Structure formats: C-alpha cells, structure tokens
Image (cartoon, rainbow, N blue to C red):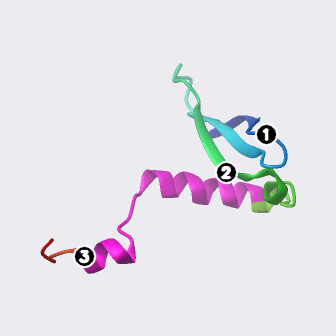
Amino acid sequence: MVIKDFTFSGEFPNFMVQALLASDDSSQEKPQKLTIGNLDYVSTLNEKELTSLIHTVYKAHQEPKLTEAMKSLVGHKL
C-alpha cells in the first residue's frame, strides 16, 4: 500500500484524519479512505508512530475479530 494523501473531515473541534491508500502496483483502483483518528491525537505522532497507526488501523479493517461479548454469547439461547 502507498499513502496517496491525507484528508480531514468533521467540524472544529472534532476534525478526523483519513489516509488515502492505494495499491503498490499500477492498477487503477480507487484509493481506499481509512479513518485513522482525531486530529488532536494524530497531530502529536511522529512519522514512525503515524506509520504504525496506519498499519494497525488498516489491519483491523482487514481482519474483523469477535469481541469478548460476542465470544461469551456463542451457544447461548436467546
């Protein structure tokens, strides 16, 4: 993945930051918009921390996992 750009959404004081991610290859896929967090938090990160956050959020969007509540309800009658 390649970071194409960063965008902002929302209104003061709750701006959110999105990273626009594109495929490494030369495909013409539309870039994926990934919300990475509140501007107040994201603006405190250095380059290494921001890269790590983007990887973490991207991975979380690719691999949904059961929550503890979901796990505990498996097999229960409704």
User: Relative to 6, is 31 above or below?
Assistant: above
Q: Is residue 32 left or right of residue 71?
A: right
Residue 45 position within the rendered picture, expressed as x and y whole percent measured from the top left: 83, 60
Q: In which quarter of the image is residue 3?
A: top right
Q: Which amino acid does label 1 sit on?
A: Glu
* Mark 3 lies on residue: 73
Camera-side residue: 59 or 73?
A: 73
- Residue beneath the point at 73% across and 39% down: 10
Please say whether residue 1 is visible from this viewpoint: no
Residue in the picture at 69% in, 41% down:
18
Label 2, secondary structure: give it. Answer: strand
In the image as oriented, which residue stretches furthest toward the top?
Answer: 28
Residue 15 among those drawn in magenta: no
Say which label, 3 or 1, has the lower sequence index: 1
Q: Residue 44: image x %, image y %?
A: 87, 60
**Magenta highlight: main SS:** helix
What residue is shown with label 2? 36
* Quadrant housing the C terminus: bottom left
* Residue at x 86%, y 54% (from the top left corner): 43
- Under circle 1, the secondary element is loop
Horizontal and vertical percent for residue 48?
Answer: 79, 60
Q: Mark 1 points at which residue?
A: 11
For badge 3, the amino acid type reads Leu
Stretch in magenta? 50-72
Residue 50 lies left or right of residue 71; in this view the side is right
Outermost residue to the front:
78
Reply above or below: 70 against 13. below
Query: Label 2 amino acid?
Result: Ile
Q: Which label was assigned to residue 77?
A: none
Q: Quadrant of the N terminus?
A: top right
Q: Which of marks 2 and 3 is nearer the N terminus?
A: 2
